[in-house]
Amino acid sequence: MSASYTNTRAESKWPRYPAVYEINTWVWLSDLSRKYGKSVDLASVPSAEWDAISAYGFDAVWLMGVWERSPAGIAIANKNEGLLADFKRALPDFHSDDNAGSPYCVRRYVVDQHLGGSEALATAREELAKRGMNLLLDFVPNHVAPDHPWIGKHPEYFIRGDSNDAKNDPSSFIEINGTVFACGRDPYFPAWPDVLQLNAFDPGLRQAVIETLAGIACQCDGVRCDMAMLFLNAVFDRTWGARSGPQPSTEYWTDVISIVKAGHPGFLFIAEAYWDLEWELQQRGFDFCYDKKLYDRLEHSDAEDVRLHLCADMAYQNKLLRFIENHDEPRAAAIFSDAKLRAVELATATLPGLRLFHEGQFEGRKVRVPVFLGRRPDETVDEGLLRFSKQLMAAANQPVFRSGDWDLCARTGWPDNQSFRNLVAWTWRKDEERYLIAVNLSGSSVQAEIQLPWADLAGAEWRLHDMLSGAAYDRDGNLMLSPGLYVELQPWGFHFLQFAPAK
């Protein structure tokens, strides 16, 4: 890819703890085209739609899947019975034309013409900038489409095999114009048949990636890097062994990120990360890494497991990306009860790190749409959840939650009442702004005393205003410090309390 783009915009500005909105671009534009009765691309999105997104207070929009889709990848996917079954599950009236191709089977890092091309993306970026929002896009380090230009021009960039590999393991190796290439893979799963595996250890590839990312960095304010941990030296070596050649003395991500950031200060790198490798990726230069552990604990574990996770060092927590939904996970409304969904949405919206929200999450969509599909089924909006989400996002759209100081609170109970263990609580403070969030992460009622970190509460009366329920409570500062602030919450109940001196 050419790096001839010119970035005429000023250095990207990001708050310490951004809020980001992920949009499945192809599907979203398909919905808008139906809504407005005309073809809508990134250049012609009505202003009202950008205004509606901006109203939530997001710091950035992640337009997932803007790069050129692969005709070869589409043809392979349309022969895959497992994928076709998944398509029909999500879209009962699925037709082969609905397969737009995987956005992670990239043919070229050029904006797909179906979405309006590069000029349309530039228009969308300007619309976001007018509303104070940055733009995030994708980068896929591990693999490319089987019709990517590098296949013919730079076969050395890839993991390759021989005729025996293609003959004996056709699901993992493919022959193209006389050269056998390995299909892309995660070491714990079968190979992906529609993509070819890049070689993280090839020095030419690293330089080509730097040039590619320099071009991307001229078109947006940051990238979400797909399956980033696969390109750590140790992981790549375990996956590919001798096929990858000698291990370099430097790490791929250290080399790539440092050089791109030198030319584009403020450009954000986000890692999709698993396998307890988040800290290592942070050390390699990533600004934020997925917090899949929190997601799993919110879904499957109890409040104590969540609390213990939140006891981690702040240098680590500050660089985690919190979510309860994204394009890879089931829809939150499909796996959480109505009451629990509100509790976990409040939690992820008010923890330190980057907070990721997925288009359709607030409306209560339940169908997870495979990323290959160009459209999705109609679903009824959950008006109650939408009202709650709007109220929550308005309450959390304060400077304190973008750049304030966060503290996890201790909480205590009584010998005959240990329900406090089901409560997790934390505070935020910035100058005179103070907030307490307390969440009951259980299906039983809880009673607890929360230990607050603010010694200067003493000697004064305080008004505690719940930003979500509207209730107000007057409390004595001395008693809130010792024995603590008493709270009682129903199953999956919560408080979002703003503290101010009582008048």
Image: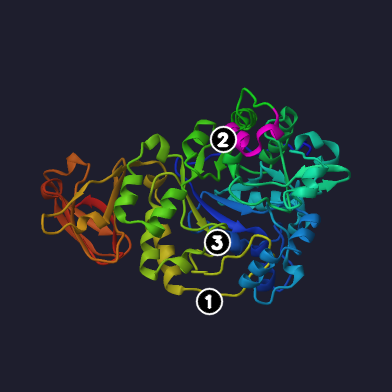
Question: Where, by quadrant of the figure, is residue 249 drawn?
Answer: top right
Residue on which the image places disc 1: 380
Q: Residue 345: horizontal and vertical position, in percent? A: 41, 59
Return the disc, 1 or 2, that comes first in the chain's sequence. 2
Position of 152 with respect to 270 (left or right) is right
Secondary structure character of the magenta stretch overall: helix
Magenta span: 231-245
Q: Nearer the viewer, residue 95 or 475?
A: 95
Residue 340 seen in the current view: yes
Seen as rendered, the residue at the extreme right is 177
Residue on which the image places disc 2: 266
Between the C-alphas of marks 1 and 2, the distance is 40 Å
Q: Nearer the viewer, mark 2 or mark 3?
A: 3
Vertical side of 359 occupied by 137: above or below: above
| Labels 1 and 3 touching (C-beta < 8 A) | no
Judged from the image, the secondary structure of the residue bearing numbered disc 1 is loop
Position of 330 with respect to 135 (left or right) is left
Return the disc, 1 or 3, that comes first in the chain's sequence. 3
Q: Nearer the viewer, residue 70 or 25?
A: 70
Return the disc, 2 or 3, that comes first in the chain's sequence. 2
What kind of residue is marked 3? Glu
